[in-house]
Amino acid sequence: MASIISDPNGRRRIQFAAGDGSRKTLRLGKATMRQAESVKVRVEQLALAASGVTGVVDPETGEWLTRLDEVMYDRLAGVGLVAERGCAKLGAFLDSYIGGRCDVKPATALVYGHTRRNLIAYFGAGKALAEITPGDADKWRLYLIGLKLSDNTVRRRCGIAKQYFRAAIRRKLLMVNPFADLKAAIQANTKRFYFISKQEAAKVLEACPDAQWRLLFALSRYGGLRCPSEHLALRWGDVDWEKGRILIRSPKTEHHAGGESRMMPLFPELLPHLREVFEAAEPGTEYVITRYREHNCNLRTQLERIIKRAGLQPWPKLFQNLRSTRETELAERWPVHVVCAWIGNSRAVAQKHYLQVTDEHFAQAATEQTPKPTQNPTQATESRPKATQNPTQQTPELAREGPQPIGQTALFGQKRHRAGQCEGVMGDTGLEPVTSRV
């Protein structure tokens, strides 16, 4: 615990126990008791982190550090509570940042850990943040490519590295982000698209070891759920058997307004698998999927084995292509905004990452019945008979013929009276009545 000492001249200082057991003093200068109490709370947090008791700085204290002026920050660095600005080490900073992100889910923290591991492996934990240059960042990106990571994985880790060093700037440990110019936008990779036909899905369902695995696969292929988060969040109370709807809870998008859940139809393809698991469930069971809930349960590896057992070759992006297949199917029957509401993504994301152009689309387009031209347009022009009068001056008989057959026109498909065959011959005066000259 820290304590505040007030000197006669109005100055205050804070004493605290360092990690080695010694007593250290942080001099505040002239300050009110309220100001001293506020600093005391931060000093206690920093002392616990520096001594290894917590090992990390809480987010509020981290934000407080970014607002400190140089004088106070240097005083904290002088008593060992923070690293000197410009001398912060990569390993300690990354551990502090990741450990302080109490707002992220375990899966996101795991992704953060992958990028941390790559940074430490290349630069070393003792590398000073200020010593990493934009050129070093470019070389690190090439290092990731050398690890045979996919282009989008490289982009994603570059984006997370940007995020790390942006936080360092906010904490005033750096002035410039060396990773700022690295490309991080995820690109669509249509080469890894794969459409799982209903025949293939039937074989996989038959090869599944139990009813819960069949439901897991069906929810992915015919429900388009994100696996495993949305499968494991599904409760029996979310299934409205009477209205034929299912409430899908989405941990991935719950931080967006209105993204915590969505309604999806109880598709006919899902119904038998849901009923099978429901009838086998113990009374009072809350979650639909009760097995395969452990964090170390690798559903991807198990699905690969099931697919091979079904006599098929595992396709790329196993679960995402199941979701992509379903969205593509639904988009052929329902408006896109409806499908996106059921699947839980935006039109832009669906268009870029999910909707596929399949072999069946080409086959249907090639066999679709369309009118075929009977002759070359040039030949049609050459063989066309010459009109002997203005088309608007058709005889009443022709006008009463009604709709003409496709491919024929009123000019060329019917017999017409020639002007010379009219009963009356027009005189020199024409059709207008004769008038006297003015």
Image: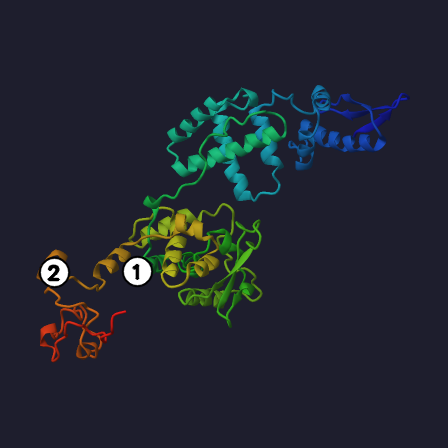
At 25% across and 60% down in the image, what residue appears? 364
**Image quadrant occupied by the N terminus:** top right
Marks counted in the figure total: 2
Give, as a three-letter code, the residue at label 1.
Gln
x, y percent for residue 183: 44, 33
x, y percent for residue 128: 56, 21
x, y percent for residue 45: 72, 32
Q: Which of marks 2 and 1 is nearer the N terminus?
A: 1
Q: In this view, does 360 lie above or below 143?
A: below
Residue 387 badge: none
| Residue behind mark 2 | 380
- Give the side of residue 30 with respect to residue 21, left or right: right
Choose between 430 and 219: the one closer to the eye: 430
The answer to whether one can see residue 195 in this image is yes
At 30% across and 49% down in the image, what residue appears? 313
**Neighbourhood count class around disc 1 (C-alpha, 10 Å): few under 14, some 14–19, many 20 upward:** few
Q: In this view, does 45 lie above or below 412?
A: above
**Image quadrant occupied by the C terminus:** bottom left
| Residue behind mark 1 | 199
Give, as a three-letter code, the residue at label 2.
Ala
Secondary structure state at the residue bearing disc 2: helix
Choose between 423 and 113: the one closer to the eye: 423
| Residue most extreme to the front | 438
